[in-house]
Image: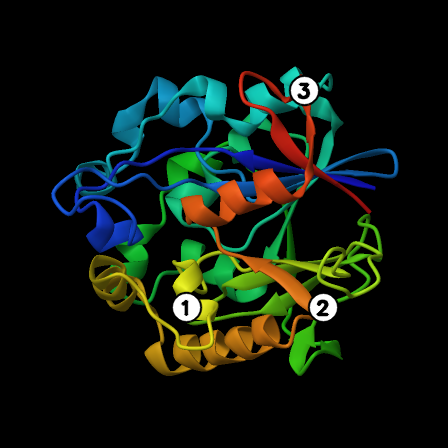
């Protein structure tokens, strides 16, 4: 099994180091949509989709408020569909998509893979189709799934994984992929865990965890957690359940510190850069080589 790291959408919010912690304060920051493409069995598995070709061709389908605050670049060459083709596959080779949640910068590419089965939590699918709050009515953009995806909702039940509830044995997916409920940012937010087969040491950790938007900055997983001020405010404004979000963040922090897993979130440029320097790269991934993990 090979795992490709993809940036499926760059955003340039105003704020510089107040957003990233690493740039001058009054400049635009740079964030990414960190996705995974997994070569597994007889097809490909995509974890989150970032923005899609529909978003790049019709930016107006994203809300004006989102475009104002996030300033998405919307480059078609950054879409998962284009990157899959550059890797030598067709979009039809993507048989499964696993979503951490349905926010616009995670689900925009669904329409580019109309035949894929789309795995997500049942609670997230319900929130998108039957929003309970003004926040849920704002955050979900139905045009991104107007093609009628083949939804595969999963209930938050099953085994356990390092103290998290875990959903295993996902239909059609390798047994090395499991889901962990990480609600808080949205009602049905998930983490996606992959057993890479590593030996658990620092150079080859066994577990890879896509934490989605359960946190926003690598500093939040350090021994003395920190987060740039604009992101702290942003997390609070978009959270569906603060108590649950903070509880799950604390558990992720503990897991990161015990060294059992390589955890990353969806939008931190630093974490993507770190992955690019610590993994073998694939020259066929496009203009910028994408990191590849052999599992």
Sequence order check, earlier mark of 3 and 2: 2
What x and y, as percent, mark residue 159?
76, 78
Residue lying farthest to the right in this orientation: 41
Q: Which mark is residue 167?
A: 2
Splitting the image into 4 quarters, where does residue 178 fall? bottom right
The residue that appears at 49% across and 65% down in the rendered structure is 188
Q: How many marks?
A: 3
Dot in front, 1 or 2: 1
Task: Describe residue 216's horizontal placement relative to residue 181 as left or right.
Answer: left
Q: Is residue 40 visible to the viewer in this orientation of the structure?
A: yes
Q: Earlier in the sequence, mark 1 or mark 2?
A: 2
- Residue 150 in sight: no
From the image, tell me which residue sits under label 1. Answer: 220
Q: Quadrant of the N terminus?
A: top right
Q: What separation in Å lies between label 1 and label 2 (alpha carbons)?
A: 25 Å
**Disc 3 marks which residue?**
283
Instruction: Mark 3 or mark 1: name the one nearer the start of the chain.
Output: 1
- SS for tag 3? helix
Counting from the top left corner in percent of width and height, residue 265 is at 49, 55
């Amino acid at each position: 099994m090979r795992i490709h790291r993809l940036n499926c959408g760059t955003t340039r919010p105003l704020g510089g180091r107040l957003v990233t912690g690493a740039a001058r304060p009054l400049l635009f920051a740079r964030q990414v949509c960190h996705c995974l493409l997994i070569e597994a069995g007889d097809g490909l598995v995509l974890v989150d989709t970032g923005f899609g070709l529909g978003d790049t061709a019709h930016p107006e389908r994203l809300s004006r408020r989102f475009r104002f605050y996030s300033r998405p670049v919307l480059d078609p060459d950054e879409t998962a569909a284009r990157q899959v083709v550059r890797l030598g596959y067709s979009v039809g080779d993507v048989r499964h998509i696993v979503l951490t949640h349905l926010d616009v910068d995670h689900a925009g590419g669904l329409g580019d893979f109309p035949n894929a089965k789309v795995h997500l939590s049942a609670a997230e699918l319900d929130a998108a189709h039957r929003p309970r709050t003004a926040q849920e009515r704002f955050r979900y953009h139905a045009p991104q799934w107007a093609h009628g995806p083949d939804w595969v909702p999963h209930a938050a039940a099953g085994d356990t994984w390092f103290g998290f509830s875990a959903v295993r044995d996902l239909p059609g997916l390798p047994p090395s992929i499991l889901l962990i409920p990480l609600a808080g940012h949205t009602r049905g937010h998930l983490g996606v865990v992959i057993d890479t087969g590593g030996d658990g040491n620092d150079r080859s950790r066994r577990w890879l965890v896509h934490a989605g938007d359960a946190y926003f900055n690598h500093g939040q997983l350090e021994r003395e957690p920190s987060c740039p001020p604009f992101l702290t405010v942003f997390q609070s404004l978009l959270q569906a359940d603060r108590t649950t979000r903070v509880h799950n963040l604390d558990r992720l922090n503990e897991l990161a510190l015990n060294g059992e897993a390589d955890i990353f979130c969806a939008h931190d440029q630093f974490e993507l850069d770190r992955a690019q320097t610590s993994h073998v790269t694939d020259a066929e991934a496009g203009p910028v080589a994408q990191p590849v993990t052999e599992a």
